[in-house]
Image (tube, rainbow, N blue to C red):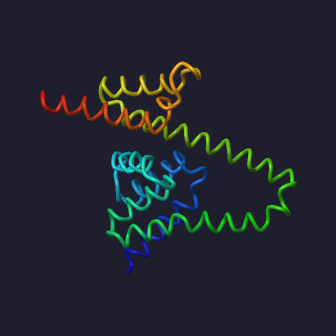
């Protein structure tokens, strides 16, 4: 029972201190679950993160479910997910109840500007860490440059279906599968 409470508490902390979702969760996960708890490695987090991006739902929720499941099975996945969503849900309910009363206060607007800046910094930090972990060889760099190039092309050059994030992720996965399968056969 104690280990389930520890799992719940750890993910409540992750959920409480994550602002912005998506990439902004990674520094908090690194601090709480990698450095503090040693439950996962950064490489495992990046693998779970990748899977979380292509599965339905919020990335943070999916990531919490995967890590909780790894720690304590299905019940651990459920507890970790509940721990992660509890702070955000509580805050959203409180903000929804109060927003009409505080939305026009200049200090609140200034605070949100500061929060957006902090979230941008956390996202940049995560991108830098991901880049360091992903580019292990020239094939990964080629896939990255290709996908990035396609995604920034002006509209009208390629059909929108090819520029779709879903298509780009699927094509990248296929390219990675083919390239790294061929590399493994050669080794």
Percent coordinates x, y for residue 1 in the rendering: 37, 81
- Left or right, 16 with respect to 46, comes to right
Quarter of the figure with the C terminus: top left
- Left or right, 96 with respect to 166, comes to right
- Among the 4 quarters of the image, the one containing residue 101: bottom right
Percent coordinates x, y for residue 167 in the rendering: 43, 35
Q: Could you tell me how many numbered marks the image carries? A: 0
Q: In the figure, 62 relative to 155: above or below?
A: below
Q: Which residue corresponds to the image point at 87% horizontal and 54% vertical from the top-left?
A: 104
Q: Residue furthest top?
A: 157
102 and 173: which is toward the camera: 173
Percent coordinates x, y for residue 147 in the rendering: 44, 27
Q: Which residue corresponds to the image point at 56% horizontal and 43% vertical from the top-left?
A: 122
- Left or right, 129 with respect to 138, comes to right
Q: Which residue corresponds to the image point at 32% horizontal and 62% vertical from the top-left?
A: 70
159 and 176: which is toward the camera: 159
Q: In the figure, 62 relative to 118: above or below?
A: below
Q: In the figure, 114 relative to 76: above or below?
A: above
Q: Which residue corresponds to the image point at 79% horizontal and 47% vertical from the top-left?
A: 110
């Amino acid at each position: 029972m104690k280990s389930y409470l520890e799992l719940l508490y750890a993910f409540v902390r992750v959920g409480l201190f994550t602002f912005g979702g998506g990439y902004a969760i990674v520094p908090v996960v690194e601090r709480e679950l990698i450095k503090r708890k040693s439950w996962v490695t950064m490489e495992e987090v990046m693998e779970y993160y990748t899977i979380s991006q292509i599965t339905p739902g919020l990335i943070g929720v999916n990531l919490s479910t995967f890590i909780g499941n790894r720690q304590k099975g299905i019940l651990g996945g459920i507890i970790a997910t509940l721990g992660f969503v509890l702070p955000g849900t509580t805050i959203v309910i409180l903000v929804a109840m109060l927003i009409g009363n505080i939305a026009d206060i200049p200090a609140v607007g200034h605070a949100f500007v500061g929060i957006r800046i902090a979230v941008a910094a956390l996202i940049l930090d995560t991108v830098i860490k991901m880049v360091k972990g992903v580019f292990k060889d020239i094939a990964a760099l080629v896939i990255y440059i290709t996908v990035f190039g396609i995604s920034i092309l002006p509209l009208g050059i390629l059909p929108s279906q090819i520029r779709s994030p879903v298509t780009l992720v699927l094509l990248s996965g296929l390219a990675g599968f083919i390239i790294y399968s061929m590399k493994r056969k050669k080794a």
